[in-house]
Image (cartoon, grey):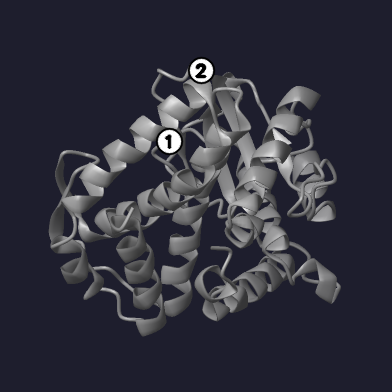
Amino acid sequence: MDNPGLFDFPPTTRLHRERTRKIHTILSPDTQPPPSAVGSAADYCLAHHTLEGAESAARSGERATFDWYTANPRADIATPTTIGPRVVVAPDLTDLPRSPISETPYYVLGPGTEPAPLGLRTLAADAFATAADTGFGTLLTAHAVVVVLLRTKQLDDTLDSWTITRLPGTVFLDHVGDPVVLARDLIHEAGHNWLNDALTATGCKIDDQVAFHSPWKQSMRPAFGFLHACWAFPLTMLYTARVLEHTEGDVQRFLTAYLDQQRGHLATTAADHPRALELVGDEALRERLAAVHRQALTL
């Protein structure tokens, strides 16, 4: 399903280019960046880390750190993967602060950033390869550039993962040391980043006065969150259905149970999803969201 017509969204491509150029202009107004520095989703992601870090350094009066950010708009600790260089880090959890910019902990690349240990970088590279082999390379290329690996857990543990809008293209994930499972969660979080960018790029404002029942939260959720869930979870369902035949043992049992659970959850959204889509003003975006939801319902 690596269909450029689905994940390659021209308004988002323009957003990435324009926002990256604007950030470079803000941080280095006297320097014209080369076209190669503003043309990719990776540049867009890293530029937001640079902006966030520079703003924080400026607020706290850390001149040396601010100068580092303005002189280093790109990271040079990238890990080679089948979809291109990725930044894979595994910071101490105490280095993940909370602040008004995010309800969840987050991490900003900076002068003290080091790559994750080799074993974790290999795990991430294998996960990207697995996702690409099952049709999600285009999605991850543009929307999972910085990977922040959190806690190592067991298959029967709750795996936490998230994104924050201030750091597009960055994903935060627990993992179980298995690339097939990590690929699933990379796809889920990249899906959230994709939809955030697509909504911004098309100027779609979702009316959050309207709410729908979310089977994933077992509660009424604003339309924005409901639409996000009805996009990100179906993507992981499509991935899981494709990768299952290549798994065995505990991982296969884990993913089979996951897919069964998601089938039940998604079925309960069949009536509400078309109503929620009416709140999405851009036709091309609306069609993409509908197509993925519809395809996942057939699994």
Question: In the displayed image of the protein, which residue is found farthest to the front?
Answer: 245
Give coordinates of residue 94: x percent, y percent: 57, 20
Q: Nearer the viewer, residue 104 or 51?
A: 104
Q: Is residue 174 above or below residue 42?
A: above
Mark 2 and mark 1 residues within 8 Å of each other at the beta carbon: no
Residue receiving disc 2: 153
Residue 292 makes an appearance in the image: yes
Q: How far apart are marks 2 and 1 (CA)?
A: 19 Å
User: Residue at (40%, 48%) from the top-left corner?
Assistant: 237
Q: What element carries label 2?
A: loop
- Residue 22 lies, in percent from the top left, at 66, 72
**SS assignment at label 1:** loop
Q: Position of residue 134 (x, y in %)?
A: 58, 52
Pointer 2 or 1: first along the chain = 1
Q: Can residue 209 be seen in this view?
A: no
Q: Viewed as shown, does residue 149 lie left or right of 187?
A: right
Residue 7: quadrant of the picture? bottom right
In the image, is 198 to the left or to the right of 180?
A: left
Q: Give the residue type at disc 2.
A: Lys
The one nearer the camera, 49 or 154, is 154
Residue 104 is tagged as 1
Image point (58%, 57%), residue name: 135
The one nearer the camera, 120 or 131, is: 131
Quarter of the image for residue 291 reads bottom left
Q: What residue type is labelled 1?
A: Thr
Using a 10 Å C-alpha cutoff, classify the residue at mark 2 as few (fewer than 14 neighbours), some (14 to 19) or many (20 or more): some
Between disc 2 and disc 1, the foreground one is: 2
Taking the spot 28% from the left edge, 53% from the top edge, the residue there is: 225
